[in-house]
Amino acid sequence: MKTIAPRTWQLVLLFLAVTGALLAGAAPASAHAALTGSDPKQGAVVDTAPKKVSLTFSESVAISDGAVRVLDPAGKRVDDGKVAHSGGTTYTVGVHSGLPDGTFTVAYQVVSADSHPVAGAYTFSIGAPSKTTAVVADQNAGGGVVGVIYGIARYVSYAGFALLVGGAAFVLGCWRRGAGSKPVQRVVVGAWTALTAATLVMLLMRGSYTGSGKLGDVFDMSLLGQVLQTKTGAALTSRLLLLAAAALFIAVLFGAYAKKNEEDAEGGEAGKDTQDGQDGQDAKAKERNDLTFGLSVGGAVVAAGLAATWAMAEHASTGIQAALAMPVDVLHLLAVAAWLGGLTTLLVALYRVPTIEGSAVRRFSRVAFCSVLVLVATGLYQSWRQVGSWSALTGTAYGQLLMVKVGLVAVLVGVAWISRKWTARLSETVAAAPVAQEQASEVSEVSEEKEPVSVAAGGKGASPERAAQLARQRAAMASAREKRVRDADPHRFGLRRSVLVEAGIAVVLLAVTTVLTSTEPGRTEEEAKSATSAAQAQTGPLSLKIPFDTGGADGKGTALLEMDPGRTGNNEMHLYIERPNGKAFDVPEVKLALTQEAKKIGPLPVVPDHIATGHWTASGVQIPVAGDWKVALTVRTSDIDQITINKNAKIG
């Protein structure tokens, strides 16, 4: 069967291609801290101007002066710009005195404890609601072009880490002779280069990514200085320092270590028949084993340090049991790298290296099996920690992505099982590889003997151009012979196909994992929803925006219903009717009815008084019990055009 052997860079591009499409259309990173409370509360109408505005989040956040802005109805800032931590997860900013009546906008932009940007805005009113021209246009944290580039750099960094650690581990633990293989060297060195470049990009773009989202701010050194003082900045800087140590490790692995393996292989046959030669071989073997041990220990320390730069700055560093979660996360990342990075290196070797020992493939099979066991154990713990409940698993984006990841891992394990079958068959025929090489060499010699004209033409007196042409021809012939040797074994061909399928699934799996790391954990999302619901149930005015269309001419508009304080007992209600263009809209009639179906209360009619253009109000609206109420709003825009819209609201 004819096969086409891709080049090394094509195999690496396979590892990256699918993810580019996935990340290109990805939405900005989800907020991992949620606003659960504020003072004044969202939509509240207060009698007097507050002296400060307080925001409470579901977890601690990194916040700086200017991160919370209070804008008056005209869009002018009225805060003092100084944000203070007032205890727990609450932060305050002072506002100027003598504020006018009207609707004010509070905009905030912070960074959650697991390094992801959080931005949002809400409104409150002093005296009575009013129109506002405040526009929060520059809040683009985690989005835009900067967000896309940062997301791609995140993926490249994960892929680079997996290939760097997995490739080096494959050489040291499974196939020591691979240290002298150029294709394997290109994979590991390319992975180091990609990880270093991605880390530099993330460090430079971090300030803009969590701030304005403007590409022009990437080279703002003041922003870079602020980033270096954050937890994420420290993690990225530590990663760069560890990559410098990794460069030294790579130089020794593919330099002195590879050379020593070659020397041992060349001198093994020559000196094994004499006692002195045997002693010399034993000494060289001990020296090689000592170097292997030193490289293994040093490489493990560097790899664990690199993995820790993710654990110390992302999901594992926040939430419950952080002290246990971080080392578990390090183990998880190392297992991923050993499996997927080693798998990609094996794939490159199967396509680009003339021979690979069956023992090396069997050793990697055992390494992959152990890695899967570690992944299952650490993954179960991480899933429990980040999800916590079945509702969070099925009802949140994080939980749904997690189920997709688990499914991909299951498929990958199934394909790996098929690969193990081909591995066993390959080991049975591996002894034939040297014979095939010897036969190919003999064919080469015979071919050269049959080309006296070409040899003579390339000898003394031949032109440099002709000599270069002949050299290229011989190289092409040698490459073709190597390819025939590789493709001659059907078991190797079968193993290549199954490993290629594994690598393709691994690309998608790594993409899902990257998106998962920038998605709000299910446990956090559910806790934030619970805290927000509890806060809304305890306090806060009711605010409902109800679009309507009676079907007649000039029958479209929007009703804004506000009820203060939104609790059981007496409430004051305001109703504003606007046209689609935002202008106040007087309609012939509006009325409301409140019903709590669970306790069979109502409908309780409310007939508001018209006090201004597009503005109705009612005092003393009684809410007898707290709970879920159905609000029925009836709007009549002409003698015959009328509609009733039902909305559910939690009151009390």
Image (cartoon, rainbow, N blue to C red):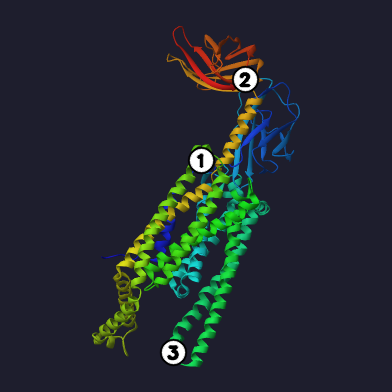
Q: Are marks 2 and 1 in contact (CB under 8 Å)?
A: no
Rendered location of residue 364, percent (x, y)? 45, 66
Q: Secondary structure at mark 1?
A: helix
Residue at label 3? 270
Residue 279 as seen in the image, left or right of residue 505:
right
Q: Amino acid at mark 1?
A: Leu
Tell me the tag on residue 352: none
Viewport quadrant of the C terminus = top right
Residue at label 1? 393
Tell me the tag on residue 626: 2
Crowdedness of circle 3 by 10 Å Cα count: few (<14), some, many (20+)?
few
Residue drawn at (51%, 50%), measured in percent from left and top? 514
Q: Secondary structure at mark 2?
A: loop
Residue drawn at (61%, 20%), measured in percent from left and top? 562
Q: Amino acid at mark 3?
A: Ala
Residue 527 as seen in the image, left or right of residue 78:
left
217 w.r.t. 238: above or below = above
